[in-house]
Image (tube, grey):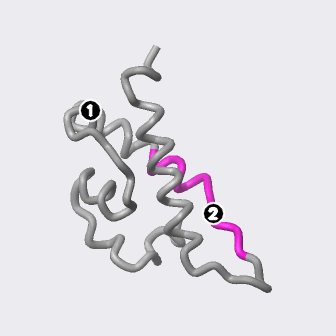
Amino acid sequence: MEWFYQIPGVDELDSAESFFEFFSVPYDPLVLRHCCLPVLREFHQRLRQNVPLRNLLEEAPRAPWLLARRLLTESYQHHLPEHTP
């Protein structure tokens, strides 16, 4: 998960909303208020399980940011009311 903390600015995030704004993930504040802990817990688990792929020929400096954005989006969508059993 070291790769995540190397994303410039990530160490300044201090709330669930700040993560969503930093990674440009659309969210409903009312929904997030009720599920922010489960979403952030799942996001943390996904971060630990994933590592951005690096291509030595074509390094993508935004790859870690894009991966973190996708993982946050997936974590949030998993906890939306329409996805909850």
Residue at figure coordinates x 62%, y 56% from the top left: 50
Residue drawn at (44%, 72%), measured in percent from left and top? 5
Q: Position of residue 7 (x, y in %)?
A: 45, 75
Upstream in sequence: badge 1 or badge 2: 1
Left or right side of 1 for 81: left
Q: Which residue is mark 1?
A: 31
Task: Give the crowd class for mark 1: few <14, some 14-19, many >=20 residues within 10 Å.
Answer: few
Instruction: Give the labeled residue for mark 2.
Output: 51
- The magenta segment is 43-54
Q: Is residue 77 left or right of residue 49?
A: left
Closer to the eye: label 1 or 2: 1
Please say if 56 is above or below 22.
Answer: below
Count the numbered circles shown.
Answer: 2
User: Left or right: 52 with respect to 28?
Assistant: right
Q: Residue 57 got which mark?
A: none
At x 33%, y 54%, the residue is 20
In-image side of 16 versus 51 (left or right)? left
User: Which amino acid, mark 1?
Assistant: Val
Task: Check disc 1 and report its element: helix, strand or loop.
Answer: helix
Residue 6 colored magenta?
Answer: no
Task: Measuring from the top left, give residue 72's x and y in whole percent.
Answer: 45, 50
